[in-house]
Amino acid sequence: MECVEPIRSKEQINAIKCYLRNHNLRNYLLFVLGINSGLRISDLLSLTIEDVKEVDRIILREKKTGKPKDFPLSDTCKDAIQEYFTNTKIDSNWLFKSKKGDRAITRIQAYRVINKAARMTGITEAIGTHTLRKTFGYWAYKNGADITQIQKLLNHSTPAITLAYIGITKDSLDNIYKNLNL
C-alpha cells in the first residue's frame, strides 16, 4: 500500500471540491465529509441516509476499533448533505450508493474517485482515501487544535504517532524555533 499524504493547500482542497461538485454530488459529499470528520473510509462508506439526514451529529461505532464515535457536523458538511439530498434522486438507504446495485461504493471505487479528482486538479503527490483522514488531522493541527486532542479524535496511542501521521516533520517543528524571534 502506497503511503499517502494530507492535502496541505487550501487552494488544492477548494479545487477538488469544485471539480467534484461539478461532476458528481455523491463524490463531492464523500470528500467533504471525509476531510471534515476524520473518519476512516470504511466508516464513511458504511454511512446511511438515516445517519446524516436532518441530524446535527453523526453517531456510529468504528469498524476498526469497535469504539463509539459521536461528533457534530460542521456547517460545511450540513450544506453538502443538504445539496446532495436536494439535487439527487435517493433510491437507497446507502449514503454513498453504488451505481451497481443497492450497496455502498467500494473502497476501490472511493480511491478512484479521490485519486482522479486530485489528478484532474493538478495534484501529483500520492493521494488516496486515507488522504481524507490525514487532511482532517493536518488542518485541525494547522488551525490550532492541540495535538493531544487530535490524537484522541484519530484514536492514536501517542502524540508522536499523530504528528508523523499528519505529516508534521522535525523540520516543521524546528521552524517554530527559527521563526518565533520574540
Image (cartoon, helix red, strand yellow):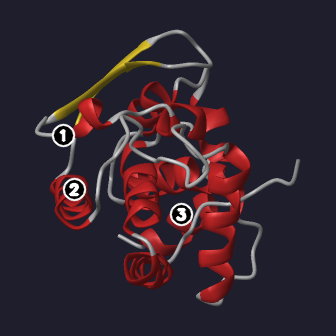
- Residue drawn at point x = 58 percent, y = 41 percent: 41
Answer with left or right where residue 78 lies relative to residue 143.
Answer: left
Say if residue 168 shows up in the picture: no
Q: Badge 2: how crowded within 10 Å, few (<14), some, or many (20+)?
A: some
- Residue drawn at point x = 65 percent, y = 90 percent: 122
User: Could you give the CA–CA distance between mark 2 and mark 1, rounded to whole angstroms?
Assistant: 8 Å
- Give the secondary structure at mark 3: helix
Vertical arrangement, residue 173 with respect to residue 28, above or below: above
Q: Quadrant of residue 168?
A: bottom right
Q: To which residue does mark 1 refer?
A: 53
Q: Nearer the viewer, mark 3 or mark 2?
A: 2
Q: To which residue does mark 2 refer?
A: 85
Vertical arrangement, residue 105 with respect to residue 15, above or below: above
User: Could you give the CA–CA distance between mark 3 and mark 2, rounded to whole angstroms?
Assistant: 48 Å
Q: Position of residue 124 (x, y in %)?
A: 75, 82
Name the disc covering residue 177, or none.
3
